């Protein structure tokens, strides 16, 4: 007998397929200020999150809140313009619900982007950082609770959460465009407050290069589902800094928007060879 979660996932998937009957191969999650990147692809259909049964709804400025179906390089893509965060009041299972829906729709690879604060002192605003690993100790694991055996194993391996082959392809694409891509470890925190100076120093001490309020729960769920994952952080602000300036969400959105074209070029180049 199907669990309540499985029934909800089936209902969400069937509703989406009643509008868009194709099976996407690749999923993309766009972070803060990056929603316009979808316009660079051939859009086939759009569905507002509010219309999908059991789907959460984005509440954060810079997240438009719709599932976009598009095509690039002959590949069918489902793109999330807006994600969900623990700090919005959603449970980890709600935050990661769309990952499972995308898996049921047919994707085998997931591209993730986010806006992040720079912890590495060699980073500057506007840099793109390939995420090679993450630190999830400051967030709640979305797999806590009874395991859904139909969705994945009880104890998923996390020794390689970000696909090494996809990372190498991204580096090649970055060299082609002259982007000067960075590479580092993403530290996930709950938010919604930005980090204190002492917290930035702690994150640096434990090996973090960038910090943000999303992604790690999504990646854990994607690994649980057996998806290949590639993720990029857009460095939208700097935590390790000398001046006494403050960080605002508006500045994060602006930096994300400016980096959007570079990010979508990178994704499109990788989609062609996935």
Image (cartoon, rainbow, N blue to C red):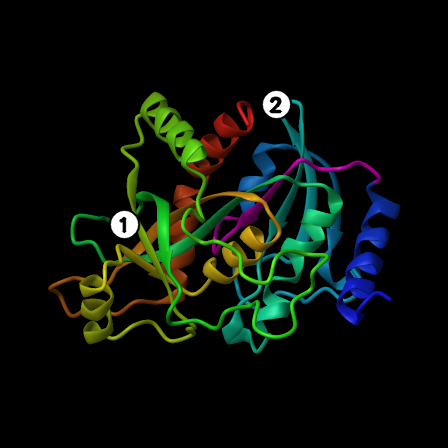
Q: Quadrant of the N terminus?
A: bottom right
The residue indicated by pointer 1 is 125
Q: Residues within 10 Å of mark 2 (few under 14, many from 20)?
A: few
Q: Which of the 4 image quarters holds residue 60?
A: bottom right
Residue 136 drawn at (x, y percent): 40, 64
- Between the residue at mark 1 and the residue at mark 2, the CA separation in whole angstroms equals 30 Å
As drawn, the label of residue 267 is none
Residue 268 drawn at (x, y percent): 52, 29
Q: Is residue 252 left or right of residue 245?
A: right
Q: Does dot 1 land on a helix, a strand or a loop?
A: loop
Residue at point 20%, 73% (across, down): 197
The residue indicated by pointer 2 is 73
Q: Quadrant of the C terminus?
A: top right
* Residue interval drawn in magenta: 21-35
Magenta stretch contains residue 68: no
Residue 101 drawn at (x, y percent): 71, 54
Residue furthest to the bottom in view is: 89
Q: Is residue 131 above or below residue 239?
A: above
Nearer to the camera, 170 or 194? 170
Residue at point 41%, 73% (across, down): 191
- Could you tell me if residue 245 is visible in this image? no
For the stretch drawn in magenta, the main secondary structure is loop
Q: Does dot 2 land on a helix, a strand or a loop?
A: loop
């Amino acid at each position: 007998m199907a669990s309540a979660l499985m029934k909800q996932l089936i209902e969400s998937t069937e509703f989406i397929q009643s509008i868009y009957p194709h099976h996407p191969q690749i999923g993309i999650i766009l972070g803060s200020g990056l929603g316009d990147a979808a316009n660079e692809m051939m859009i086939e259909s759009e569905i507002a999150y509010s219309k999908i049964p059991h789907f959460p709804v984005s509440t954060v400025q810079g997240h438009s809140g719709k599932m976009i179906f598009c095509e690039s390089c002959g590949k069918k893509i489902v793109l999330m313009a807006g994600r969900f965060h623990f700090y919005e009041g959603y449970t980890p299972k709600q935050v990661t619900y769309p990952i499972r829906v995308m898996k049921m729709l047919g994707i085998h690879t997931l591209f993730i982007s986010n806006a992040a604060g720079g912890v590495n002192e060699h980073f500057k605003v506007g840099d793109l950082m390939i995420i090679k690993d993450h630190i999830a100790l400051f967030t709640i694991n979305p797999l806590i609770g009874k395991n859904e055996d139909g969705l994945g194993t009880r104890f998923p391996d996390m020794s390689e959460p970000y696909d090494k082959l996809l990372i190498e392809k991204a580096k090649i694409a970055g060299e082609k465009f002259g982007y000067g891509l960075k590479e580092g470890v993403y530290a996930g925190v709950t938010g919604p407050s930005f980090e204190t100076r002492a917290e930035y120093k702690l994150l640096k001490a434990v090996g973090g290069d960038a910090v943000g309020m999303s992604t790690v729960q999504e990646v854990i769920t994607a690994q649980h589902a057996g998806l290949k994952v590639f993720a990029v952080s857009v460095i939208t602000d700097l935590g390790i800094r000398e001046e006494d300036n403050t960080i605002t969400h508006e500045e994060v959105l602006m930096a994300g928007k400016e980096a959007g074209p570079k990010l979508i070029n990178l994704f499109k180049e990788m989609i062609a060879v996935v």
